[in-house]
Amino acid sequence: MPTVPSILGFGAISIDDIVYVDQPLSAGKGKVLQSARAFGGNVATALAAVARLDGSAGFIGWLGSAVDDAVLCDLVASGVETAFAPRHADARPVRSRITVGSDGDRFIAYDDEAMLGTAPDFPDEVLSRATVLIVDSYAIGSLDVVARAQGLGLAILGDVEWNGGPATERLIALCDHLILPLGFARTATGRRSPAEILDALWLPSRSAVVLTDGGRGVYYRGRDEAGLWHLPPHRVEVVDSTGAGDCFHGAYALALTRGADTAGRVAFAAAAAALSITGRGGREALPTDDQVKALLASTNAPSAVELKHARLDTATEPELSEEISRR
């Protein structure tokens, strides 16, 4: 039996049909420049990012039982271990249609009527040999497995993007490393400013709360340091933002296994995500470890600045954008 990877994950795995157009999505219509089919999904792409960065990653969600299953073969080709994943003849990926505008922004339409999560009796023997478990919103169907993993001492890294009611609230509570898109975090907490949201999501059990905000950077709070922080974005040429958040999660998980503190984990993940948007699709530009380290060492790499409650709690969106642009 293969060695259990340090980083395990289960959740969305998808086949994406991507269309690139010559106008921003706000234009309402545009000419098709290129079409492509690619593999994606939150957790699957995060694990592929881990493997690309020279980490050990294993997918433990449902996979099809056929040996030539397309998503199985893609995971293997991406360097992700699949030996521990439960199999079922009815398992299939999420199917997505993605439109990418000329500015790199995208709209995702998806059909997620699929077997997601993992087997309810997934063995503790496997879980106990890992260090980090990455889960996404679909883990609400396997909360007992997440709870068992937490009880076994794994760091639970949550990538939550939509609300399934009380089950989502329990999932969020189980995550000691909670990494959310700022838009969803606003909806989940009813708060507006990043500082207020970080405080609202904080629990004594948390190790870190991180809010990703695309071209505005990342906001975070960690147990191992005082204060609330904002890391401005890296300045890179945006080709396609698909999968950037997933790459962030994978890189963060890897930095966690390497012993980095909160600031180090966020910096490493933000650099990896920035590099990932310089190519098409969610996987084409997943960076290597050396590429991330080179970007972090560059003279124009951003530095984190402390958030000031008095300023950001009352700022409007334009004021907040202006404040960030001055830093």
Image (cartoon, rainbow, N blue to C red):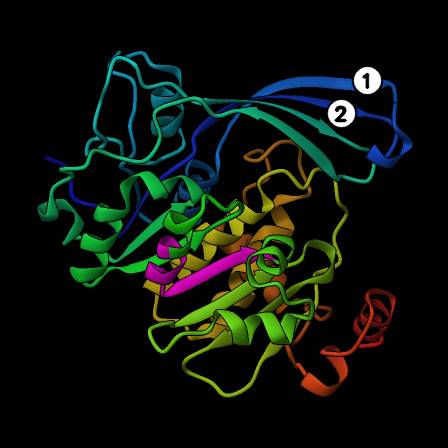
Which disc number belongs to residue 20? Answer: 2
Question: Can residue 5 be seen?
Answer: no
Sequence-wise first label, 1 or 2: 2
Question: Tag 2's secondary structure?
Answer: strand
Residue that appears at 29% across and 33% down: 61
- In-front residue for pair 129/184: 184
* Residue at the extreme front of the image, as rendered: 166
Q: How many marks?
A: 2
For label 1, count other residues whose C-alpha is less than 10 Å away and answer few (under 14), some (14-19) or many (20+). Answer: some
Q: Are marks 1 and 2 in contact (CB under 8 Å)?
A: yes
Whether 14 is among the magenta residues is no
Quadrant of res 103: top right
User: Label 1 is placed on what type of residue?
Assistant: Val
The quadrant the N terminus occupies is top left
Residue that appears at 33% across and 28% down: 76
- In-front residue for pair 124/51: 124
In the picture of the structure, the residue carrying the numbered disc 1 is: 32
Span highlighted in magenta in the image: 170-181
The quadrant the C terminus occupies is bottom right
Residue that appears at 35% across and 43% down: 140
Q: Name the spot of residue 131 as percent of width and height, x first.
A: 25, 58
